[in-house]
Image: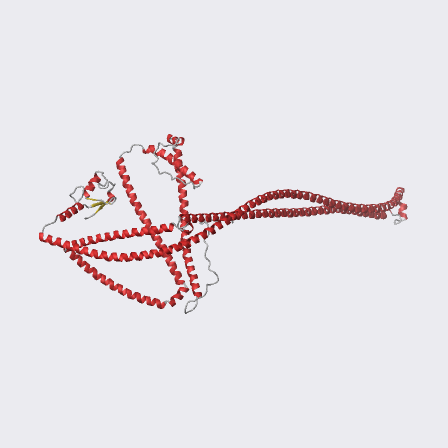
Amino acid sequence: MPSSKRGDIPSFEDRPSKRMKRSDTPLEELTDGGLLSQDDVVYYQKEAIYRLLNTIRHRNQRLRKEVKKMNGKYTILSKYYHIINNWWSEIIDNFKNFDLITKIENEDGSEFNQHLLISVPEMNDRTSGETKALTEELKGKREKLIALLQPILSLPVTNRDDKLVELEDSFTNLNAFKSNLEGENKMLKEKIEDLNQELDKYIKKVDVRKSKSLDRISDNLHDREELKEEEEGKKGNMNSSSSVDGNIEGESSLKEAQAVKYELEDLKVAFSSLKNEHKNVKEQLQKELTNISVLQKEISGLRSRLSNLSEDDLKGSPAYQSVITRNSELTAQLNQVKFNSSKIESQLYDMESNLTAHKKQLEDDAKSQIAANAAYITKLESDINRIRADRDKLRSENNILKAEKGKTELCDEYRQLNESLQKRLDELIVASKIEMDPEDGSVDDIKEETPDKISLIRKNKLLIKELKQMEEAFTSIRKSFATKLSKYVESDAYINKLSVEKSRADEKYFQAMRAKDALTAQNKILKGSITKQADLIDVLKSNEKRLIEKLDVEKSLYSKLKEVESLYTNDLTYQKNASREAEIKLSSTKKEFDSLKTELFGKQEALGEKDKVISSLNSKNESNESKVHELEKLIAKYRSNSRSAEDDAIDQALLTMTKCQLCNKNFKNVTLKSCGHCFCSECIHNRLASRMRKCPSCNKQFSNYDLLSIHL
């Protein structure tokens, strides 16, 4: 079941079945023995109320089940009704090419037979617009169907009489079947009612068996019940003896009946006495009727006396009834007004609660979305800044490493070159010393050399001196180059450091610019959300104004309804007071009427007893006279030994009653179920063979299924 708001009131069928919860605190405890106390009486009353509520609860459950079944059947019938209605509308639409339907649509269609179909019942002025529209639609469809069916039914039909007879037979059979079904339905309803009553009795018995207070009372009344059982046993013995006497009397009555069969004269005497008694009873009945009419006149006089009282003292008068009806109408209107006001208040509260809930939900959603977006943006910005810082750091480290790598390679190459040059110089120096040093050679060797060789040696010495000078110059140049190289390395390292600082500064600048862009974007988003919130606030303010206006209207209505309620309550109190006064006066008049009635009944009883004595004496006298008269007739009959004309008339009447009135030769042995008249089988079968299927006495239709054989 969907959750309903406070304003929505569920139907009876939709209401959930409430289970009766027993209270946690038990009832008052019973006393153990002795006389019953006041607490025991209260306990007994509470248990009686609980038993009554239990039976009502079971009846309510059964009624709810029946209501559910009826609702299911109603839905099925409504579905079938819609389907059949659609079928008829489709049939009418398919046969719309007939000129008859257009004639009805253009004119009133009065020339058609309006008795062909059942007419639609007229609605009252109090009916709703939907029912009126439905009746108008049904009337239009009825007229169109009459226009379609009338030309078809006006065509000539072959074997019309036979078909009419068959239709009448089927109609009678259907009526019989309908009556049987109605009887069965009535029997089943009575059985259901009996079963429900038995179920209620069983529930009451179970509750009574479980009742502690009744057990407590039964303990005190045990002795009285034993006395009652003894008295009932005595009564049972008396009844058994009376039943034995009844059996004996039955046997004696059988013997008397056998004796009466052989004594026809005694029967006639008894018949005449019964006739006289019947006459006496008729006379007594007429007297009683006259007495009843007199009593009715007296009662009507008393009623007129009651009805002609003053207007304030009349309860059964039309004015008082009109006041009561007016009071009930006012109470119903008041209840309806209260119901409508409570419904409107609940709807208003539901609207306010829904509005506040929607407003709070929208604000919470917007705040949570803004916070989530801001947190996500800050996280992304922090991640981007961290990634960019790591990238710039790695770039600077990479540049430094690249610069240091180039410096180390250059220094290594320069060092290798110096080492190779130093090695070459050392080798040259050693070779020149070994080869060209004159100090190491002997003078004889020099003398032995040629002048060219001597000039070459001199040149070598000069070259050695120049080489030493060049070496000194090279060392000085190398030192100066080393100093310049160290200065270059220092300047390059400083430049690299400055470039790293510059890249970091650039990164900080770009980071600041990105933060500025993010702040501007966030500012734009916040401005958009602020505008949306302002629009939402305007809408909510307009809704609040509308609700305030509605609330003012509802308050004014509520105040008016309270005024009307106060008027109704005042009128109701006035009517209650008037009704109480009328009831008091009516009770006094009723007491007077009862006293008069008791006096009248006493006088009537005395008169009735006297009339009974007189009528009994008269009846005895007349019966004795009739017996004497009949006995005299019998004596005269036996003396004459002749058959009387009365006996012949009786015999002739019996013959006419037992013989068929159509042929007057056969006895009646067949009766008709449809009307109950009796005939002989030969005449009935002849009429069936000649298709004359109407009763000769009452002209009702009958068939083979209506024949019932009898024996007179």
Q: Residue at x 19, y 56 (%)?
A: 621
300 vs 395, left or right, is: left
Outermost left residue: 640
Q: Is residue 230 above or below residue 285?
A: below
Residue 7 visible in the snapshot: no
- The image quadrant of residue 82 is top left
Task: In this rendered view, identify the residue nearer to me: 75 or 284.
Answer: 284
181 vs 621, left or right, is: right
Q: Position of residue 298 (x, y in %)?
A: 32, 52
- The image quadrant of residue 124 is top left
616 vs 94, left or right, is: left
Q: Position of residue 489 (x, y in %)?
A: 79, 46
Task: In this rendered view, identify the residue nearer to me: 446 or 360.
Answer: 360
Task: In this rendered view, identify the residue nearer to me: 610 or 457.
Answer: 610
Q: Residue at x 35, y 67 (%)?
A: 224
Q: Position of residue 111 (x, y in %)?
A: 35, 31
Outermost bottom residue: 34
Q: Position of residue 397 (x, y in %)?
A: 73, 47
Q: Residue at x 26, y 38 (%)?
A: 165
Task: In this rendered view, identify the residue nearer to me: 668 or 395.
Answer: 668
548 vs 137, left or right, is: right
- How many dots with numbers? 0
Residue 218 visible in the snapshot: yes
Picture colour scheme: secondary structure
